[in-house]
Image (tube, rainbow, N blue to C red):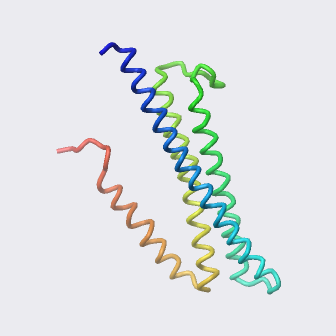
């Protein structure tokens, strides 16, 4: 197979990967929007009360979830930019195009989408703290739902070379 056909195939596969990541970011943005609607409804019911730890935790939760929505939208915009022909990028790549697309996709995913997820989880913890009126239960839930799977994922080293 000639080199140009390989490059075109890889480029098409990279663009499909960018599109799938963009779909995930769109779904997450929609989920965040629904969660924000429910959160604002809960916060409105607390506005008549005094400023308590529950009230502050709810506002912290809303703030983190709004930041999460912003990062999720930034992820979608960054990935959308990668779907344009690289020659039309504001700063066209100087090296191989496929490598530039891959690097920019990974950069957007790690710096923007992961930040969106972390802020969202922080917001959920803040809301759980407001609902349960204690901090230990939300932190325990966070540990089980996020930290344990993350440690297992990192220990599996999927996609890495096996040393041995």
Give residue 137's position: percent from left, percent from top. Answer: 51, 82
Where 64 sits versus 16, above or below? below
The quadrant of the rendering that contains the N terminus is top left
Please state if 48 lies on the left or on the right of 156 as rendered: right
Give residue 156's position: percent from left, percent from top. Answer: 29, 54
The quadrant of the rendering that contains the C terminus is top left
Q: Residue at x 57, y 72 (%)?
A: 125
Please state if 156 lies on the left or on the right of 106 as rendered: left
Give residue 120's position: percent from left, percent from top. Answer: 59, 62
- Residue 86 figure quarter: top right
Q: Nearer the viewer, residue 23 or 86?
A: 23
Where 61 sits versus 79, above or below? below
Q: Nearer the viewer, residue 81 or 95?
A: 81
Q: Nearer the viewer, residue 6 or 70?
A: 6
Q: How many marks?
A: 0
Q: Residue at x 67, y 57 (%)?
A: 67
- Residue 154 figure quarter: bottom left
Q: Residue at x 49, y 40 (%)?
A: 106
Q: Nearer the viewer, residue 51 or 70?
A: 70
- Residue 54 figure quarter: bottom right
Q: Residue at x 67, y 52 (%)?
A: 70
Give residue 83's position: percent from left, percent from top. Answer: 57, 31
Please state if 113 lies on the left or on the right of 49 as rendered: left
As drawn, the residue found furthest toward the left would be 164
């Amino acid at each position: 197979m000639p080199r140009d056909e390989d490059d075109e195939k890889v480029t098409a596969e990279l663009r499909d990967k960018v599109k799938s990541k963009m779909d995930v970011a769109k779904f997450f943005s929609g989920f965040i929007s629904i969660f924000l609607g429910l959160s604002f409804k809960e916060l409105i019911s607390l506005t008549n009360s005094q400023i308590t730890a529950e009230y502050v935790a709810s506002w912290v939760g809303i703030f983190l979830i709004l930041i999460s929505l912003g990062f999720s939208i930034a992820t979608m915009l960054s990935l959308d930019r990668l779907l344009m022909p690289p020659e039309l990028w504001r700063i066209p790549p100087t090296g191989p195009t496929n490598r530039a697309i891959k690097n920019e996709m990974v950069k957007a995913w790690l710096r923007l989408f992961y930040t969106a997820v972390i802020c969202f989880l922080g917001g959920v913890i803040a809301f759980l703290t407001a609902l349960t009126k204690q901090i230990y239960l939300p932190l325990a839930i966070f540990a089980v739902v996020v930290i344990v799977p993350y440690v297992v994922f990192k220990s599996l080293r999927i996609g890495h070379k096996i040393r041995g």
